[in-house]
Amino acid sequence: MNIITLISTSTLLITGSAVCSGLNVALLSLDLQDLRRKTKLGDMQAKRALAIRRNVHFYLSGILLTNVTFASATSVVLGDALSGVWAVIISTLLLVTLAEITPQAIAVSRAKHAISFFSPLIRFVSYAAYPITKPLEFLLNAIVGKTAATLHSRHELGLLISEHLGKNSELDDDEVEIVQGALQLSEKRVHEIMTPIKHTYYLFEGDIIDAQKVDELKEYNYSRIPIFDKKLTKCRRFLVLKDLVDIDFDERSYTLDELKTHEAKTVGSMTALDTMFRKFIAAKKHIMIVERDKKIIGIVTVEDLVEEIIGHEIEDESDAEKHA
C-alpha cells in the first residue's frame, strides 16, 4: 500500500471513529427532561435529538459497534503497512488523540447539535446492525433499566434560579427573586408572616360605632377590621371600612349587629404558605384569623403573602405618610 493510500484510508477510518466517539459521549450527556422541555418550546434540534435519546441503548449500541469497527480497521490498515510495534504505537496515539479525546471534548459542549445533525447516520448504522443492536438494547434495558426522569429538589431549583442573578440572562433580578420566594413558600408557616395580635387593630363584639369611633378607624386606615370576643378565642366576622362610607354617624351610633359585616375564616398557625393561596381563593377573603391552641394569635392577609414572595414590603399611601 503506497503512502497516499495509507494516509487517505487511515484518515477516513480515524474520522469515522472520531465521529462515533463524539456521538457516544454526546448522546449520554443529553438530559432527557431538558430535551423534552426544549421540544415543547419548538426547538427542532432538541426534537430530533430527543427521538434518539429516548431509545438510548439501541442507538448507543449502533454507535459503539460502528466505532469499534472503525478503530479495529485502523489498526489492521496500519499493521499491514508498518511493523507490529510501530503499528500499535501509532494507531494508539492517533485513535486516543484524534478519535477519542478531541472529538469527545468537542461533542460534550455541542451535544444537542451533534446528535441532531448526525441523527440520520445514527439511525442508519443502528438499523443496519439490527440483529446485534436490538438484542444489546434488550440486554442493557434489563441490566441498567430505562432512563428515569430526573426531578430537581426545591433547593436545587433555587440554586439553578440563583445562577441567573446579575448575569446575561433572560430573567431579570426581580423575576429571579420572585421565583426564589415562591419556591420557599412550602417551607414557611403562617405564624412567620402574620401580624401578631398585640400589633393588630380590632373591635370587640359589644363595641358601639359612633362618630368618634369612625374617626379612629379612619386614623388607623385599615380596610378590614376583625371583630373578636372578649377572650380573644373567637372571630366570626370582620368589618370592611368602605361599607361605612354612606352611613351618617353624626345622627346616631350603631351596634355591630346593625352594620354590614363579613364572615371571618380562621387558619392554623402552622399552615404552610403555599397552602394559604388556595385557602384565600377558596374563602374569597383578603384576611384570615390565625389561631393556635384555640386562641387567636394574629391575622394574615393576602398582602402579607405577596410580600413574602417578592421579598419586599408593599407600602400604600397611608404607610408612606406614617413613615414620613
Image (cartoon, rainbow, N blue to C red):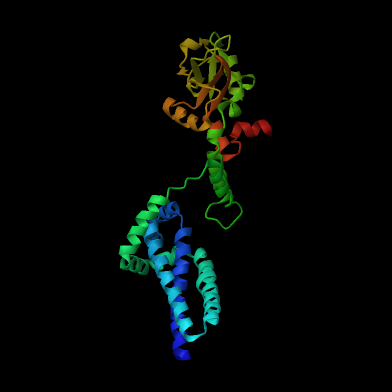
Determine whether, in the image, residue 324 is placed left or right of residue 46.
Answer: right
Observer able to see residue 296: yes
Determine whether, in the image, residue 69 is placed left or right of residue 162.
Answer: left
For the C terminus, which image quadrant?
top right
Observer able to see residue 146: no
Q: What residue do we see at 41% from left, 62% from top?
A: 60
- Which of the pair 149/182 is nearer the observer? 149
Q: What residue do we see at 53% from left, 40% from top?
A: 183
Give the quadrant of residue 191: top right
For the N terminus, which image quadrant?
bottom left
Give the quadrant of residue 198: top right
Give the quadrant of residue 282: top left
Q: Residue furthest bottom?
A: 2
Q: Residue furthest right?
A: 324
Q: Position of residue 284 (x, y in %)?
A: 43, 27
Above or below 182: residue 231: above
Above or below 37: residue 268: above
Q: What residue do we see at 47% from left, 32% from top?
A: 277
- Which of the pair 77/152 is nearer the observer? 77
Q: What residue do we see at 60% from left, 25% from top?
A: 195
Determine whether, in the image, residue 163 is placed left or right of residue 263.
Answer: right
Above or below 317: residue 213: above
Q: Position of residue 91 (x, y in %)?
A: 52, 77
The number of discs equals 0
Q: Position of residue 309 (x, y in %)?
A: 55, 38
Q: Position of residue 166 (x, y in %)?
A: 61, 53
